[in-house]
Image (tube, rainbow, N blue to C red):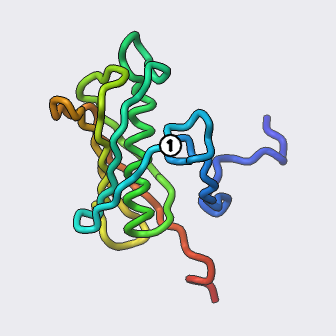
Amino acid sequence: MTSSSEKGPASTLDITPIADNYCFVCGTDNPQGLKINVTYHPKEAAATTELMLPREYQGWADVIHGGILATLLDEMMAHAVWHFAGPGLTLSMETRFHHPLKPEEPIRVRGVLTTPNGSRRTAEAEIIRVTDGKKIASGKSRFLLLEEKGKGEG
């Protein structure tokens, strides 16, 4: 039995995303964060970053945790969507793992906006090991663009 004060899953109306520099992946103020730098590529509607993940992010011995890899995929897709289409929320995400990644191996993460129009956008991303070009993980997401204040009102 639930009380009347409990709510179900949050709807998009309940959420107002605010970038406060504390994002685990790209925030500069989060002491435990990755603090990645993102580069944007307008011709491809893409966002990229390069980094190495320390052992603190492993799952199995000497293998980076898949949840951390999925987080990086989501982050780069979100950067591509926000930069080239506007603020949005991830609605769904599909992730595939192709090869394991060891701690301290350099990787390149690339997210691309794949749907140019509409309130629902799609994006794709991949993680590539820099040393040999192997695909570590890939993902596809759907995003819901948020209405800007003042837009659509009245």
- Residue lying at 23% horizontally and 63% vertically, measured from the top left: 44
Q: How many marks?
A: 1
- Residue lying at 55% horizontally and 37% vertically, measured from the top left: 33
Residue 71 image point, x, y percent? 45, 38
- Residue lying at 30% horizontally and 26% vertically, measured from the top left: 105
Above or below: residue 101 compared with residue 129: above
Above or below: residue 55 compared with residue 135: above
Residue 32 image point, x, y percent? 59, 33
Above or below: residue 47 compared with residue 139: below
Q: Quadrant of residue 36?
A: top left
Which residue in the structure is indicated by mark 1? 35
Q: Is residue 42 left or right of residue 66?
A: left
Return the residue nearer the eye: 126 or 92. 126
Q: Is residue 110 left or right of residue 8?
A: left
Residue sticking out furthest to the left: 132
Q: Is residue 139 left or right of residue 150?
A: left
